[in-house]
Image (cartoon, rainbow, N blue to C red):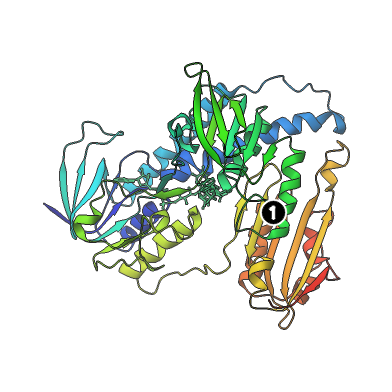
Amino acid sequence: MQELDLFVIGAGSGGVRCARIAAQNGARVGIAERRHWGGTCVNLGCVPKKLMVYAAETGRMIEDAPAFGWDVQRPETFDWYSFLAAKDREIERLNGIYISMLEKAGITLYTGDARLIDAHTIEIGPSVLAPDAPVQRVRAKKIVLATGSTPIRLDIPGAELAITSDELFHLPERPQRVAIIGSGYIGVEFAGILAGMGSQVDLFYRQTLPLRGFDGEVRAHLKELIDLYGITQHPGTSPVRLEDVGGGKAVRLVLDDGTAYEVDAVIMATGRRAAIDKLGLDSVGVVMEKGHVVAGIDGRTNIPSIYAIGDIRDEYNLTPTAIAEGHMLAEQLFNPQGRTWSFETLPKAVFFSSPIGVVGLSEEEAAQKHDLAIYTSTFTPMRQILPKRAGKVLMKLVVDRQSDIVLGAHMVGPDAPEIIQMLAIAVTAKLTKKQLDQTIALHPSTAEEFVTMRTPTRMVDKQ
Ligand SMILES: Cc1cc2nc3c(=O)[nH]c(=O)nc-3n(C[C@H](O)[C@H](O)[C@H](O)COP(=O)(O)OP(=O)(O)OC[C@H]3O[C@@H](n4cnc5c(N)ncnc54)[C@H](O)[C@@H]3O)c2cc1C
Ligand SMILES: NC(=O)c1ccc[n+]([C@@H]2O[C@H](COP(=O)([O-])OP(=O)(O)OC[C@H]3O[C@@H](n4cnc5c(N)ncnc54)[C@H](O)[C@@H]3O)[C@@H](O)[C@H]2O)c1
Protein backbone atom coordinates (compact mmCIF):
# COMPACT_ATOMS: atom_id res chain seq x y z
CA MET A 1 0.00 0.00 0.00
CA GLN A 2 1.22 3.47 -0.90
CA GLU A 3 2.36 5.64 2.06
CA LEU A 4 1.99 9.42 1.63
CA ASP A 5 2.88 12.38 3.85
CA LEU A 6 -0.57 13.93 3.45
CA PHE A 7 -3.94 12.82 2.14
CA VAL A 8 -6.71 15.36 1.58
CA ILE A 9 -10.36 14.24 1.34
CA GLY A 10 -12.30 16.74 -0.76
CA ALA A 11 -10.99 18.90 -3.62
CA GLY A 12 -12.86 22.10 -2.82
CA SER A 13 -11.59 25.55 -1.89
CA GLY A 14 -9.77 24.42 1.25
CA GLY A 15 -8.60 20.97 0.16
CA VAL A 16 -7.07 22.06 -3.13
CA ARG A 17 -5.09 24.86 -1.52
CA CYS A 18 -3.91 22.63 1.33
CA ALA A 19 -2.76 19.88 -1.06
CA ARG A 20 -1.00 22.32 -3.39
CA ILE A 21 0.93 24.19 -0.68
CA ALA A 22 1.93 20.92 1.01
CA ALA A 23 3.25 19.57 -2.32
CA GLN A 24 5.10 22.82 -3.02
CA ASN A 25 6.86 22.32 0.30
CA GLY A 26 8.09 18.86 -0.66
CA ALA A 27 5.35 16.65 0.81
CA ARG A 28 4.08 13.55 -1.03
CA VAL A 29 0.37 14.33 -1.33
CA GLY A 30 -2.80 12.55 -2.48
CA ILE A 31 -6.27 14.06 -2.84
CA ALA A 32 -9.69 12.45 -3.38
CA GLU A 33 -12.77 14.03 -4.94
CA ARG A 34 -16.14 12.31 -5.28
CA ARG A 35 -18.22 14.72 -7.31
CA HIS A 36 -16.63 17.79 -8.87
CA TRP A 37 -13.06 19.11 -8.89
CA GLY A 38 -12.94 22.59 -7.33
CA GLY A 39 -15.79 21.85 -4.88
CA THR A 40 -18.90 23.82 -4.02
CA CYS A 41 -17.61 27.30 -4.83
CA VAL A 42 -16.69 26.46 -8.39
CA ASN A 43 -19.53 24.05 -9.20
CA LEU A 44 -22.57 24.86 -7.05
CA GLY A 45 -21.70 28.08 -5.23
CA CYS A 46 -19.84 31.35 -5.70
CA VAL A 47 -18.95 31.00 -9.38
CA PRO A 48 -22.27 29.90 -10.99
CA LYS A 49 -24.10 32.19 -8.53
CA LYS A 50 -22.01 35.22 -9.54
CA LEU A 51 -22.54 34.41 -13.23
CA MET A 52 -26.29 34.40 -12.49
CA VAL A 53 -25.97 37.74 -10.70
CA TYR A 54 -24.31 39.17 -13.83
CA ALA A 55 -27.10 37.71 -15.98
CA ALA A 56 -29.79 39.35 -13.82
CA GLU A 57 -27.84 42.63 -13.71
CA THR A 58 -27.55 42.66 -17.50
CA GLY A 59 -31.36 42.67 -17.75
CA ARG A 60 -31.52 45.73 -15.54
CA MET A 61 -28.79 47.45 -17.58
CA ILE A 62 -30.80 46.85 -20.75
CA GLU A 63 -33.80 48.36 -18.96
CA ASP A 64 -31.77 51.45 -18.02
CA ALA A 65 -30.02 51.81 -21.39
CA PRO A 66 -32.62 54.14 -23.06
CA ALA A 67 -32.05 56.67 -20.27
CA PHE A 68 -28.42 56.87 -21.44
CA GLY A 69 -29.37 57.34 -25.10
CA TRP A 70 -29.31 53.73 -26.30
CA ASP A 71 -32.11 52.65 -28.59
CA VAL A 72 -32.68 49.13 -27.24
CA GLN A 73 -35.69 47.02 -26.38
CA ARG A 74 -35.58 44.79 -23.35
CA PRO A 75 -36.26 41.23 -24.58
CA GLU A 76 -39.45 39.72 -23.20
CA THR A 77 -37.76 36.66 -21.81
CA PHE A 78 -34.44 35.61 -20.45
CA ASP A 79 -33.03 32.53 -22.21
CA TRP A 80 -32.37 30.36 -19.18
CA TYR A 81 -31.26 27.39 -21.25
CA SER A 82 -28.55 29.17 -23.25
CA PHE A 83 -27.31 30.95 -20.11
CA LEU A 84 -27.04 27.61 -18.28
CA ALA A 85 -25.11 26.08 -21.17
CA ALA A 86 -22.65 29.01 -21.14
CA LYS A 87 -22.29 28.71 -17.35
CA ASP A 88 -21.63 24.96 -17.60
CA ARG A 89 -18.94 25.49 -20.26
CA GLU A 90 -17.16 27.93 -17.96
CA ILE A 91 -17.38 25.53 -15.01
CA GLU A 92 -16.04 22.67 -17.11
CA ARG A 93 -13.09 24.89 -18.03
CA LEU A 94 -12.48 25.60 -14.33
CA ASN A 95 -12.72 21.88 -13.44
CA GLY A 96 -9.94 21.24 -15.99
CA ILE A 97 -7.80 24.02 -14.52
CA TYR A 98 -8.12 22.53 -11.03
CA ILE A 99 -7.14 19.06 -12.23
CA SER A 100 -4.13 20.27 -14.18
CA MET A 101 -3.00 22.54 -11.33
CA LEU A 102 -3.04 19.61 -8.91
CA GLU A 103 -1.30 17.28 -11.36
CA LYS A 104 1.39 19.86 -12.16
CA ALA A 105 2.09 20.14 -8.42
CA GLY A 106 2.89 16.39 -8.43
CA ILE A 107 -0.17 15.43 -6.37
CA THR A 108 -1.80 12.00 -6.88
CA LEU A 109 -5.49 12.41 -7.78
CA TYR A 110 -8.11 9.85 -6.73
CA THR A 111 -11.58 10.23 -8.21
CA GLY A 112 -14.10 8.55 -5.90
CA ASP A 113 -15.71 8.42 -2.50
CA ALA A 114 -13.14 8.46 0.30
CA ARG A 115 -13.62 7.22 3.85
CA LEU A 116 -11.45 6.67 6.87
CA ILE A 117 -10.53 3.12 7.78
CA ASP A 118 -8.27 4.11 10.67
CA ALA A 119 -6.29 7.18 11.73
CA HIS A 120 -3.79 6.66 8.87
CA THR A 121 -5.72 4.69 6.23
CA ILE A 122 -8.18 5.94 3.62
CA GLU A 123 -10.29 3.81 1.30
CA ILE A 124 -11.45 5.28 -2.01
CA GLY A 125 -14.35 3.62 -3.82
CA PRO A 126 -16.80 4.35 -6.65
CA SER A 127 -18.76 7.65 -6.64
CA VAL A 128 -21.10 9.59 -8.95
CA LEU A 129 -18.12 10.98 -10.80
CA ALA A 130 -16.37 7.60 -11.05
CA PRO A 131 -18.98 4.81 -10.84
CA ASP A 132 -16.46 2.18 -11.99
CA ALA A 133 -13.56 3.29 -9.81
CA PRO A 134 -11.67 0.37 -8.23
CA VAL A 135 -11.54 0.24 -4.44
CA GLN A 136 -8.10 1.45 -3.35
CA ARG A 137 -6.45 1.93 0.02
CA VAL A 138 -3.85 4.58 0.77
CA ARG A 139 -1.90 5.22 3.94
CA ALA A 140 -0.83 8.71 5.00
CA LYS A 141 1.00 10.22 7.96
CA LYS A 142 -1.56 13.04 8.08
CA ILE A 143 -5.14 13.21 6.80
CA VAL A 144 -7.10 16.40 6.12
CA LEU A 145 -10.91 16.34 6.12
CA ALA A 146 -12.04 19.02 3.66
CA THR A 147 -15.39 17.63 2.55
CA GLY A 148 -17.35 20.86 2.86
CA SER A 149 -21.09 21.05 3.46
CA THR A 150 -24.46 20.21 1.91
CA PRO A 151 -27.84 22.01 2.04
CA ILE A 152 -30.27 21.37 4.89
CA ARG A 153 -33.95 20.80 4.11
CA LEU A 154 -36.53 21.70 6.74
CA ASP A 155 -37.99 18.67 8.47
CA ILE A 156 -41.59 19.27 7.33
CA PRO A 157 -44.03 17.07 5.39
CA GLY A 158 -43.44 17.36 1.65
CA ALA A 159 -39.88 18.73 2.06
CA GLU A 160 -38.78 16.50 -0.84
CA LEU A 161 -40.95 18.64 -3.17
CA ALA A 162 -38.62 21.60 -2.59
CA ILE A 163 -35.27 22.16 -4.25
CA THR A 164 -32.08 23.62 -2.80
CA SER A 165 -29.36 25.75 -4.37
CA ASP A 166 -27.72 22.51 -5.60
CA GLU A 167 -30.64 21.68 -7.92
CA LEU A 168 -31.37 25.28 -8.88
CA PHE A 169 -28.17 25.49 -10.91
CA HIS A 170 -29.40 22.71 -13.21
CA LEU A 171 -33.18 23.21 -13.52
CA PRO A 172 -34.34 22.50 -17.06
CA GLU A 173 -36.32 25.76 -17.08
CA ARG A 174 -36.58 28.91 -15.01
CA PRO A 175 -39.51 28.69 -12.59
CA GLN A 176 -41.92 31.57 -13.09
CA ARG A 177 -43.42 31.59 -9.57
CA VAL A 178 -40.88 30.94 -6.84
CA ALA A 179 -41.13 30.72 -3.05
CA ILE A 180 -37.83 31.00 -1.21
CA ILE A 181 -37.66 29.87 2.41
CA GLY A 182 -34.90 31.52 4.44
CA SER A 183 -33.37 34.98 4.16
CA GLY A 184 -29.72 34.18 4.78
CA TYR A 185 -27.05 34.59 2.11
CA ILE A 186 -28.56 32.10 -0.33
CA GLY A 187 -32.19 33.14 0.12
CA VAL A 188 -31.44 36.83 -0.41
CA GLU A 189 -29.04 36.28 -3.32
CA PHE A 190 -31.39 33.98 -5.25
CA ALA A 191 -34.37 36.24 -4.59
CA GLY A 192 -32.46 39.00 -6.42
CA ILE A 193 -31.22 36.71 -9.19
CA LEU A 194 -34.57 35.13 -10.03
CA ALA A 195 -36.50 38.41 -9.78
CA GLY A 196 -33.91 39.96 -12.11
CA MET A 197 -34.47 37.16 -14.61
CA GLY A 198 -38.21 37.79 -14.59
CA SER A 199 -39.58 35.35 -11.99
CA GLN A 200 -42.20 36.33 -9.45
CA VAL A 201 -40.46 35.80 -6.11
CA ASP A 202 -41.92 35.45 -2.60
CA LEU A 203 -39.40 35.41 0.26
CA PHE A 204 -40.46 33.74 3.52
CA TYR A 205 -38.50 34.20 6.74
CA ARG A 206 -39.01 33.84 10.47
CA GLN A 207 -37.62 37.12 11.77
CA THR A 208 -38.84 40.68 11.20
CA LEU A 209 -35.80 41.56 9.08
CA PRO A 210 -33.82 39.51 6.54
CA LEU A 211 -30.15 38.49 6.89
CA ARG A 212 -29.87 37.56 10.54
CA GLY A 213 -26.46 38.31 12.06
CA PHE A 214 -25.74 41.39 9.95
CA ASP A 215 -25.82 45.02 11.21
CA GLY A 216 -29.39 46.06 12.12
CA GLU A 217 -29.33 49.19 9.96
CA VAL A 218 -28.04 47.17 7.00
CA ARG A 219 -30.85 44.66 7.48
CA ALA A 220 -33.52 47.38 7.65
CA HIS A 221 -32.11 49.05 4.51
CA LEU A 222 -32.00 45.72 2.70
CA LYS A 223 -35.63 45.05 3.58
CA GLU A 224 -36.66 48.27 1.81
CA LEU A 225 -34.54 47.41 -1.24
CA ILE A 226 -36.00 43.90 -1.49
CA ASP A 227 -39.43 45.55 -1.81
CA LEU A 228 -38.12 47.94 -4.46
CA TYR A 229 -36.82 45.04 -6.53
CA GLY A 230 -40.36 43.65 -6.72
CA ILE A 231 -39.84 40.72 -4.33
CA THR A 232 -42.73 40.03 -1.96
CA GLN A 233 -41.52 39.54 1.59
CA HIS A 234 -43.26 37.45 4.26
CA PRO A 235 -41.43 38.20 7.52
CA GLY A 236 -42.40 36.38 10.70
CA THR A 237 -43.61 33.29 8.85
CA SER A 238 -42.83 29.59 9.20
CA PRO A 239 -43.73 26.95 6.61
CA VAL A 240 -45.38 23.84 8.01
CA ARG A 241 -45.81 21.65 4.93
CA LEU A 242 -45.49 21.41 1.15
CA GLU A 243 -48.09 19.74 -1.04
CA ASP A 244 -47.93 18.49 -4.59
CA VAL A 245 -50.39 20.17 -6.98
CA GLY A 246 -51.50 18.39 -10.14
CA GLY A 247 -48.90 15.60 -10.08
CA GLY A 248 -45.76 17.74 -10.20
CA LYS A 249 -47.27 20.78 -11.98
CA ALA A 250 -46.86 23.04 -8.95
CA VAL A 251 -46.16 23.04 -5.22
CA ARG A 252 -48.34 24.48 -2.47
CA LEU A 253 -46.52 26.06 0.47
CA VAL A 254 -48.59 26.12 3.66
CA LEU A 255 -47.63 28.45 6.52
CA ASP A 256 -48.20 28.10 10.26
CA ASP A 257 -51.11 30.57 10.12
CA GLY A 258 -52.84 28.38 7.51
CA THR A 259 -52.25 30.63 4.49
CA ALA A 260 -51.07 28.84 1.35
CA TYR A 261 -49.16 29.86 -1.78
CA GLU A 262 -49.04 27.92 -5.03
CA VAL A 263 -45.75 28.21 -6.92
CA ASP A 264 -43.69 26.45 -9.60
CA ALA A 265 -40.73 25.93 -7.27
CA VAL A 266 -40.00 26.13 -3.56
CA ILE A 267 -36.35 26.77 -2.77
CA MET A 268 -35.14 25.85 0.70
CA ALA A 269 -32.30 28.19 1.62
CA THR A 270 -32.28 27.13 5.23
CA GLY A 271 -28.61 26.58 5.97
CA ARG A 272 -26.02 23.88 5.38
CA ARG A 273 -24.50 21.05 7.39
CA ALA A 274 -21.09 19.40 7.32
CA ALA A 275 -20.68 16.71 4.61
CA ILE A 276 -19.67 13.79 6.81
CA ASP A 277 -21.96 10.98 5.61
CA LYS A 278 -20.10 7.69 5.19
CA LEU A 279 -16.78 9.39 6.00
CA GLY A 280 -16.01 6.86 8.75
CA LEU A 281 -15.50 9.48 11.47
CA ASP A 282 -17.19 7.34 14.15
CA SER A 283 -14.92 4.38 13.55
CA VAL A 284 -11.85 6.57 14.12
CA GLY A 285 -13.37 8.51 17.04
CA VAL A 286 -13.19 12.05 15.62
CA VAL A 287 -15.09 14.34 18.02
CA MET A 288 -18.19 15.98 16.54
CA GLU A 289 -20.51 18.67 17.85
CA LYS A 290 -23.94 19.48 16.40
CA GLY A 291 -23.08 17.61 13.21
CA HIS A 292 -19.73 19.24 12.45
CA VAL A 293 -16.14 18.28 13.17
CA VAL A 294 -14.62 20.00 16.17
CA ALA A 295 -11.30 21.54 15.13
CA GLY A 296 -9.48 24.78 15.88
CA ILE A 297 -8.43 27.38 13.32
CA ASP A 298 -5.17 25.35 13.09
CA GLY A 299 -7.27 22.41 11.84
CA ARG A 300 -6.37 20.07 14.72
CA THR A 301 -9.02 17.54 15.74
CA ASN A 302 -8.83 15.26 18.79
CA ILE A 303 -7.01 12.64 16.65
CA PRO A 304 -3.35 13.74 16.23
CA SER A 305 -3.04 12.60 12.58
CA ILE A 306 -6.43 14.03 11.46
CA TYR A 307 -7.17 17.66 10.61
CA ALA A 308 -10.29 19.46 9.40
CA ILE A 309 -10.62 22.68 7.39
CA GLY A 310 -13.36 24.73 5.72
CA ASP A 311 -17.12 24.20 5.94
CA ILE A 312 -16.79 20.82 7.68
CA ARG A 313 -15.78 22.86 10.77
CA ASP A 314 -18.85 25.09 10.33
CA GLU A 315 -17.20 28.27 11.56
CA TYR A 316 -16.79 30.82 8.76
CA ASN A 317 -18.24 28.86 5.80
CA LEU A 318 -16.76 31.04 3.08
CA THR A 319 -14.36 30.27 0.25
CA PRO A 320 -11.51 32.62 1.21
CA THR A 321 -11.56 31.35 4.81
CA ALA A 322 -11.45 27.70 3.64
CA ILE A 323 -8.51 28.63 1.38
CA ALA A 324 -6.72 30.45 4.22
CA GLU A 325 -7.31 27.53 6.61
CA GLY A 326 -5.99 25.03 4.04
CA HIS A 327 -2.94 27.17 3.27
CA MET A 328 -2.10 27.76 6.95
CA LEU A 329 -2.46 24.07 7.76
CA ALA A 330 -0.14 22.98 4.93
CA GLU A 331 2.49 25.50 6.03
CA GLN A 332 2.11 24.60 9.70
CA LEU A 333 2.83 20.96 8.75
CA PHE A 334 5.53 21.38 6.11
CA ASN A 335 6.90 24.96 6.36
CA PRO A 336 6.28 26.33 9.85
CA GLN A 337 7.53 29.87 9.04
CA GLY A 338 4.68 30.33 6.55
CA ARG A 339 1.87 32.80 5.95
CA THR A 340 -0.97 33.60 8.39
CA TRP A 341 -4.24 35.53 8.05
CA SER A 342 -6.31 37.72 10.35
CA PHE A 343 -9.79 36.24 10.76
CA GLU A 344 -11.01 38.96 13.12
CA THR A 345 -11.93 41.43 10.42
CA LEU A 346 -13.47 39.08 7.91
CA PRO A 347 -14.94 40.85 4.85
CA LYS A 348 -18.30 39.42 3.73
CA ALA A 349 -20.56 40.08 0.78
CA VAL A 350 -24.12 39.23 -0.09
CA PHE A 351 -24.57 39.47 -3.84
CA PHE A 352 -28.13 40.81 -3.85
CA SER A 353 -29.22 43.01 -6.79
CA SER A 354 -28.06 45.93 -4.69
CA PRO A 355 -25.16 44.09 -3.07
CA ILE A 356 -23.94 44.22 0.51
CA GLY A 357 -20.34 44.40 1.67
CA VAL A 358 -19.29 44.43 5.31
CA VAL A 359 -16.07 44.16 7.25
CA GLY A 360 -15.41 44.08 10.99
CA LEU A 361 -18.04 44.61 13.66
CA SER A 362 -21.70 45.52 13.33
CA GLU A 363 -22.98 48.36 15.51
CA GLU A 364 -24.67 45.83 17.81
CA GLU A 365 -21.50 43.76 18.23
CA ALA A 366 -19.24 46.78 18.73
CA ALA A 367 -21.58 48.40 21.29
CA GLN A 368 -21.07 45.44 23.61
CA LYS A 369 -17.46 46.53 24.22
CA HIS A 370 -17.02 50.12 23.03
CA ASP A 371 -18.47 53.63 23.18
CA LEU A 372 -19.17 54.38 19.53
CA ALA A 373 -19.43 57.18 17.03
CA ILE A 374 -21.63 56.05 14.13
CA TYR A 375 -21.27 57.68 10.72
CA THR A 376 -23.94 56.95 8.12
CA SER A 377 -24.78 58.26 4.71
CA THR A 378 -27.66 57.37 2.39
CA PHE A 379 -27.93 58.76 -1.12
CA THR A 380 -28.97 57.94 -4.68
CA PRO A 381 -25.94 56.84 -6.70
CA MET A 382 -25.26 58.86 -9.85
CA ARG A 383 -25.75 55.81 -12.10
CA GLN A 384 -29.42 55.61 -11.05
CA ILE A 385 -30.33 59.26 -11.60
CA LEU A 386 -31.01 59.34 -15.37
CA PRO A 387 -32.93 56.03 -15.47
CA LYS A 388 -34.76 57.20 -12.31
CA ARG A 389 -34.02 53.85 -10.69
CA ALA A 390 -35.11 53.86 -7.06
CA GLY A 391 -33.01 52.53 -4.18
CA LYS A 392 -30.46 54.35 -2.10
CA VAL A 393 -26.93 53.42 -1.14
CA LEU A 394 -26.21 53.00 2.57
CA MET A 395 -22.68 53.54 3.86
CA LYS A 396 -21.80 53.20 7.52
CA LEU A 397 -18.71 53.40 9.70
CA VAL A 398 -18.62 52.10 13.27
CA VAL A 399 -15.87 53.95 15.15
CA ASP A 400 -14.50 53.45 18.66
CA ARG A 401 -14.89 56.86 20.35
CA GLN A 402 -11.89 56.43 22.61
CA SER A 403 -9.22 55.22 20.17
CA ASP A 404 -10.86 56.58 16.95
CA ILE A 405 -10.21 53.12 15.37
CA VAL A 406 -12.68 52.08 12.66
CA LEU A 407 -14.18 48.85 14.00
CA GLY A 408 -16.57 48.15 11.15
CA ALA A 409 -17.52 49.35 7.67
CA HIS A 410 -20.83 48.46 6.03
CA MET A 411 -22.26 49.23 2.64
CA VAL A 412 -25.37 48.36 0.67
CA GLY A 413 -25.30 49.51 -2.95
CA PRO A 414 -23.64 49.03 -6.32
CA ASP A 415 -20.06 47.73 -6.10
CA ALA A 416 -20.25 47.34 -2.30
CA PRO A 417 -18.24 44.04 -2.30
CA GLU A 418 -15.47 45.63 -4.41
CA ILE A 419 -15.30 48.75 -2.24
CA ILE A 420 -15.42 46.86 1.06
CA GLN A 421 -12.64 44.48 -0.04
CA MET A 422 -10.31 47.49 -0.23
CA LEU A 423 -11.60 49.10 2.95
CA ALA A 424 -11.02 45.76 4.71
CA ILE A 425 -7.29 46.51 4.53
CA ALA A 426 -7.83 49.71 6.52
CA VAL A 427 -10.04 47.98 9.09
CA THR A 428 -7.61 45.05 9.42
CA ALA A 429 -4.73 47.52 9.86
CA LYS A 430 -6.79 49.19 12.64
CA LEU A 431 -6.67 52.59 10.95
CA THR A 432 -8.45 55.49 12.62
CA LYS A 433 -11.31 57.60 11.36
CA LYS A 434 -8.82 60.51 11.24
CA GLN A 435 -6.64 58.52 8.82
CA LEU A 436 -9.64 57.88 6.59
CA ASP A 437 -10.38 61.63 6.72
CA GLN A 438 -6.77 62.40 5.67
CA THR A 439 -7.29 60.37 2.49
CA ILE A 440 -8.21 62.51 -0.51
CA ALA A 441 -11.45 61.51 -2.16
CA LEU A 442 -11.57 60.00 -5.65
CA HIS A 443 -14.29 61.87 -7.49
CA PRO A 444 -16.86 61.11 -8.77
CA SER A 445 -17.16 57.73 -7.10
CA THR A 446 -19.45 56.10 -4.58
CA ALA A 447 -16.49 54.95 -2.52
CA GLU A 448 -15.40 58.52 -1.79
CA GLU A 449 -18.21 58.79 0.75
CA PHE A 450 -16.16 56.57 3.08
CA VAL A 451 -13.49 59.30 3.36
CA THR A 452 -15.84 62.30 3.38
CA MET A 453 -18.27 61.52 6.22
CA ARG A 454 -17.36 64.30 8.67
CA THR A 455 -20.05 64.46 11.34
CA PRO A 456 -21.22 61.47 13.37
CA THR A 457 -24.87 60.59 12.84
CA ARG A 458 -25.14 59.51 16.47
CA MET A 459 -23.20 58.47 19.54
CA VAL A 460 -23.88 55.05 21.04
CA ASP A 461 -22.72 54.26 24.56
CA LYS A 462 -21.40 50.85 25.56
CA GLN A 463 -24.35 48.54 26.39
C1 LIG B 1 -25.06 28.75 -3.45
C2 LIG B 1 -23.79 29.09 -2.73
C3 LIG B 1 -23.16 30.29 -2.97
C4 LIG B 1 -21.99 30.61 -2.30
N1 LIG B 1 -21.41 31.82 -2.57
C5 LIG B 1 -20.28 32.16 -1.91
C6 LIG B 1 -19.65 33.41 -2.19
O1 LIG B 1 -20.11 34.20 -3.01
N2 LIG B 1 -18.51 33.71 -1.52
C7 LIG B 1 -17.96 32.84 -0.60
O2 LIG B 1 -16.91 33.16 -0.03
N3 LIG B 1 -18.54 31.65 -0.33
C8 LIG B 1 -19.68 31.30 -0.96
N4 LIG B 1 -20.26 30.09 -0.70
C9 LIG B 1 -19.64 29.20 0.32
C10 LIG B 1 -18.45 28.43 -0.26
O3 LIG B 1 -18.83 27.77 -1.45
C11 LIG B 1 -17.95 27.42 0.77
O4 LIG B 1 -17.73 28.06 2.00
C12 LIG B 1 -16.65 26.77 0.31
O5 LIG B 1 -16.83 26.11 -0.92
C13 LIG B 1 -16.15 25.77 1.36
O6 LIG B 1 -14.99 25.12 0.90
P1 LIG B 1 -14.57 23.70 1.45
O7 LIG B 1 -13.23 23.41 0.88
O8 LIG B 1 -14.74 23.62 2.91
O9 LIG B 1 -15.65 22.68 0.85
P2 LIG B 1 -16.22 22.46 -0.62
O10 LIG B 1 -15.87 23.53 -1.55
O11 LIG B 1 -17.65 22.13 -0.43
O12 LIG B 1 -15.44 21.16 -1.12
C14 LIG B 1 -15.62 19.90 -0.54
C15 LIG B 1 -15.41 18.84 -1.61
O13 LIG B 1 -15.31 17.60 -0.97
C16 LIG B 1 -15.95 16.62 -1.79
N5 LIG B 1 -16.28 15.48 -0.92
C17 LIG B 1 -17.19 15.43 0.08
N6 LIG B 1 -17.15 14.23 0.68
C18 LIG B 1 -16.22 13.49 0.04
C19 LIG B 1 -15.72 12.17 0.18
N7 LIG B 1 -16.19 11.35 1.13
N8 LIG B 1 -14.77 11.74 -0.67
C20 LIG B 1 -14.28 12.54 -1.65
N9 LIG B 1 -14.70 13.82 -1.82
C21 LIG B 1 -15.64 14.27 -1.00
C22 LIG B 1 -17.16 17.35 -2.34
O14 LIG B 1 -17.66 16.73 -3.51
C23 LIG B 1 -16.57 18.74 -2.59
O15 LIG B 1 -16.11 18.87 -3.91
C24 LIG B 1 -21.42 29.71 -1.37
C25 LIG B 1 -22.04 28.48 -1.13
C26 LIG B 1 -23.20 28.18 -1.80
C27 LIG B 1 -23.85 26.85 -1.55
N1 LIG C 1 -21.97 35.60 -0.62
C1 LIG C 1 -21.50 34.63 0.15
O1 LIG C 1 -20.42 34.73 0.71
C2 LIG C 1 -22.31 33.38 0.35
C3 LIG C 1 -23.36 33.08 -0.49
C4 LIG C 1 -24.09 31.93 -0.27
C5 LIG C 1 -23.75 31.08 0.77
N2 LIG C 1 -22.72 31.39 1.57
C6 LIG C 1 -22.37 30.51 2.71
O2 LIG C 1 -23.23 29.40 2.73
C7 LIG C 1 -23.86 29.30 4.00
C8 LIG C 1 -25.24 28.74 3.84
O3 LIG C 1 -26.11 29.73 3.28
P1 LIG C 1 -27.64 29.74 3.67
O4 LIG C 1 -28.25 30.97 3.11
O5 LIG C 1 -28.26 28.42 3.37
O6 LIG C 1 -27.59 29.78 5.27
P2 LIG C 1 -27.75 30.98 6.30
O7 LIG C 1 -27.37 30.43 7.62
O8 LIG C 1 -27.10 32.22 5.82
O9 LIG C 1 -29.34 31.26 6.28
C9 LIG C 1 -30.25 30.26 6.62
C10 LIG C 1 -31.66 30.85 6.66
O10 LIG C 1 -32.57 29.78 6.92
C11 LIG C 1 -33.43 30.16 7.98
N3 LIG C 1 -33.86 28.97 8.71
C12 LIG C 1 -33.07 28.08 9.37
N4 LIG C 1 -33.83 27.14 9.96
C13 LIG C 1 -35.12 27.43 9.64
C14 LIG C 1 -36.36 26.84 9.98
N5 LIG C 1 -36.44 25.75 10.74
N6 LIG C 1 -37.50 27.42 9.50
C15 LIG C 1 -37.43 28.52 8.74
N7 LIG C 1 -36.28 29.12 8.39
C16 LIG C 1 -35.14 28.59 8.85
C17 LIG C 1 -32.59 31.11 8.83
O11 LIG C 1 -33.38 31.92 9.65
C18 LIG C 1 -31.87 31.90 7.73
O12 LIG C 1 -32.70 32.91 7.22
C19 LIG C 1 -23.82 30.71 4.57
O13 LIG C 1 -23.82 30.72 5.97
C20 LIG C 1 -22.56 31.27 4.01
O14 LIG C 1 -21.50 31.02 4.90
C21 LIG C 1 -21.99 32.53 1.40
Packing grade of label 1 (10 A; few <14, some 14-19, many >=20) is some
Can residue 448 be seen here?
Answer: yes
Which residue is painted at 65% across and 72% down in the image? 366
Q: In the figure, 74 relative to 90: above or below?
A: above
Q: In the figure, 7 relative to 125: above or below?
A: below
Q: Is residue 294 left or right of residue 79?
A: left
In the displayed image of the protein, which residue is found farthest to the front?
258
Nearest to the observer: residue 12 or residue 355: 355
Quarter in which the C terminus is drawn: bottom right
Which residue is painted at 33% across and 55% down in the image? 19
Q: In the figure, 87 relative to 216: above or below?
A: above
Where in the figure is residue 166, as x and y percent of width and height? 46, 36
- Helix, strand or loop at mark 1: helix
Where in the figure is residue 373, as x and y percent of width and height? 77, 74
Can residue 334 be seen here?
Answer: no
Q: Which residue is mark 1?
A: 219
